[in-house]
Amino acid sequence: MSQSEPWTVGRLLKWTAGYLTEHGADSARLDAEVLLAEALGCPRIDLYVRYGEEPKEEALAAFRQLVRRRAEGTPVAYLVGRREFYSLEFRVGPDVLIPRPETELLVVALLDLAKQRPAGRPIALADVGTGSGIIAVCAAKHLAACRVTAIDVSPAALEIARANAADHGVAERIEFVQSDLFAAVDVDRRFDFVVSNPPYVSTRELETMAAEVSGFEPRTALVAGQRGTEVIEALIPQAVERLLSGGHLLIEIGPAIHEAARSLLEAEERLLPGPTIKDLARLPRVLQASRR
């Protein structure tokens, strides 16, 4: 393509997709579209009605900067500051994990169980390790009777979670608590549900992960320790103490720790384990149990 040709939206997308592919991006075309829409300040779908348009230099400069950082490995979600999850848009940043589709399985399991309860009955839920607040917000958004305690050890993560709760109009039904698991939660509090997407990556597994995950997402939210089960080991007995009789515990896991994590669940005599929920790839993804 001649350098004398105009840099239209269509040409920018084609060139950038090729450039990002060369730099190892798995979804280069999508990345190019998201970043160009961000630079132009328009919805991504609008790019296709502006295909022949030549962006102004200010937008081009912003786009070049975004593409450079993406080529260096910065995740797109951190570049644009948001990510879709369960059909809602959430703010994200380097202080929280980027929401992933696998976590939607935990939300679906939670909503299914909650809807089996008598209509209108209040639901108390603890979201342990809330991060950006995606589980807490989805629960409050879809369960009108739900009151959520969103817990995280990171004050920076809680700030993002608070902003997301406000964005989606559910802040008045979520209490945010800075705490290492349940340590700072009132000892008398009891819950119908305890849900968690805890750190479950082992230090060895971290070495095999993509650089944009291991190099950019917060290590404390990813890595549990040498075994990958350290946080779950601490969480299960604390959750049991806080669950009401018949209450439910839901924990997201990685396939690499499934057997070890399930053994921990089965060893807790006060819990009745349910079947592990598998993701679309048929990999174990969510542990579930109920309080005897």
Image (cartoon, rainbow, N blue to C red):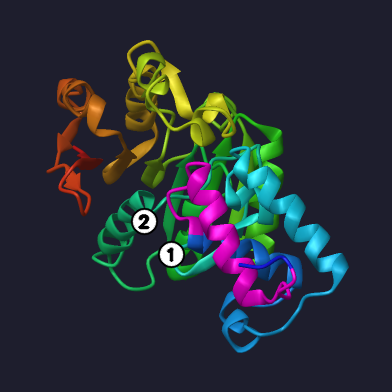
Q: Is residue 90 found left or right of 127 in the rendered image?
A: right
Residue 9 counted in the magenta span: yes
For the view shown, which residue lies furthest in the right direction?
58
Magenta span: chief secondary structure: helix
Q: Residue at x 43, y 41 (%)?
A: 190
Q: Are marks 1 and 2 in contact (CB under 8 Å)?
A: yes
Residue 110 lies in the magenta-colored region = no
Foreground pick, 71 / 78? 71
Residue at (32% x, 38% y) in the render: 251
- Left or right relative to 191: residue 77: right
Residue at screen point 31% across, 43% down: 250
Q: Which mark is residue 104?
A: 2
Q: Residue furthest left?
A: 275
Q: Secondary structure at mark 1?
A: loop
Residue situated in front as seen by the camera: 242 or 84: 84
Q: Please state the extent of the stretch shown in magenta in the rendering.
A: 4-28
Q: Can you say whether 181 is above or below 140 in the image?
A: above
Farthest-out residue, top: 226
Indicate the position of residue 30 as horizontal and vertical percent values.
Answer: 50, 63
Label 1 to label 2: alpha-carbon separation: 6 Å
Question: Does 179 appear above or below 59?
Answer: above
Residue behind mark 1: 86
Quadrant containing the C terminus in the rendered view: top left
Q: In the image, which disc is placed on residue 206?
A: none
The percent coordinates of residue 115 (x first, y second) are 29, 67
Mark 2 neighbour class, 10 Å CA radius: few under 14, some 14 to 19, many 20 or more: some
Q: Nearer the viewer, residue 3 or 27?
A: 3
Horizontal side of 14 relative to 288 (left or right) equals: right
List x then y, in percent, for residue 144: 47, 71
Q: Amino acid at mark 1?
A: Tyr
Residue 16 shows up from this direction: yes
